[in-house]
Amino acid sequence: MQLLVSPATIEEAKKALSADIVDVKRPEEGSLGASFPWIIRAIKDLTHKPVSAAIGDFDYKPGGAALTALGAAAAGADYIKIGLMFDGIEEAEMLIHSVTRAVKETYPEKMVVIAAYSDWERLETISPYDMAPLAAKAGADISMVDTGIKDGKSTFEFMDETRLVEFTKLNQKLGIKTALAGSLKFEDIEILKRINPDIIGVRGMVCGGDRRAMVQEELVLKAVSMVH
């Protein structure tokens, strides 16, 4: 299980370099809010670790999503991560295919991460279980769950351990990796080890519980030691 930490600035990124994956996002722009290409590039220059970039919580705009994904890849991101903030199997299939093709045609070695939301029922968006087969079919690499509304509620409040194990096993059967995120806490790490996703993503955990606060290096180190 790898630890992905999401700094919002270059200064925060310097405090997150002990993580397995350094994720670049802009929390002001949403759950998977996109940052700027020059921030991605600068953070890529800071570390030999893989760099991930969120590109947004997208409604159904496959062209815009594809172009944004290619931009993040060109800026240096090793993982390109998008959230599906809409419902509909056919629409999701089209957007996932477009994003995956945009990245893989130019950067076949880069990883495409497709995220659905653990709170999909209150958002009325596509469920993680419906998203995962579409991600696998399109040739994406990782199927992810995160919370769409950042109101302090954890993924565990919407999907319990049994449902998260089911999601993880579905991805394994489909031949893609699993990432879990969404207001995760230190006390969740033991449960997460039982679920055994490939990646867990955190921000609030290493900001002292408030994702709007600053990443703290000592909390990143604590998370790394607990995950490994």
Image (cartoon, rainbow, N blue to C red):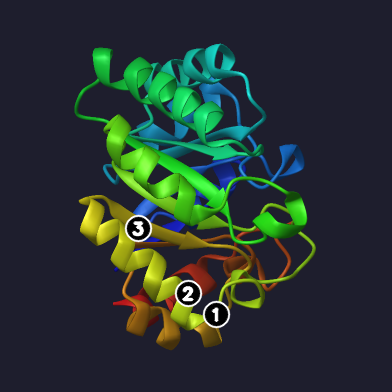
Residue type (three-letter) at the residue carrying disc 2: Arg
Q: Which of marks 2 and 3 is in front?
A: 2
* Quadrant in the picture for the C terminus: bottom left
Residue type (three-letter) at the residue carrying disc 3: Thr
Residue 198 visible in image:
no
Cα gap from disc 2 to disc 3, whole angstroms: 13 Å
Q: Earlier in the sequence, mark 2 or mark 3?
A: 2
The residue positioned 38% from the left and 82% from the top of the image is 226
* Quadrant in the picture for the N terminus: bottom left
The residue positioned 51% from the left and 29% from the top of the image is 90
SS class, disc 1 = loop
- Up the image or down, 72 lies above or below 176; here it is above
Cα gap from disc 1 to disc 2, whole angstroms: 5 Å
Residue 58 image-quadrant placement? top right
Contact flag, marks 1 and 2 (Cβ < 8 Å): yes
Residue 44 image-quadrant placement? top left
Residue type (three-letter) at the residue carrying disc 1: Asp
Report the residue marked by disc 3: 178
Q: Which of marks 1 and 3 is nearer the N terminus?
A: 1
Q: Residue 160 carries which label?
A: 1
Q: Where is residue 185 in the image (x, y as percent from the top left)?
A: 58, 78
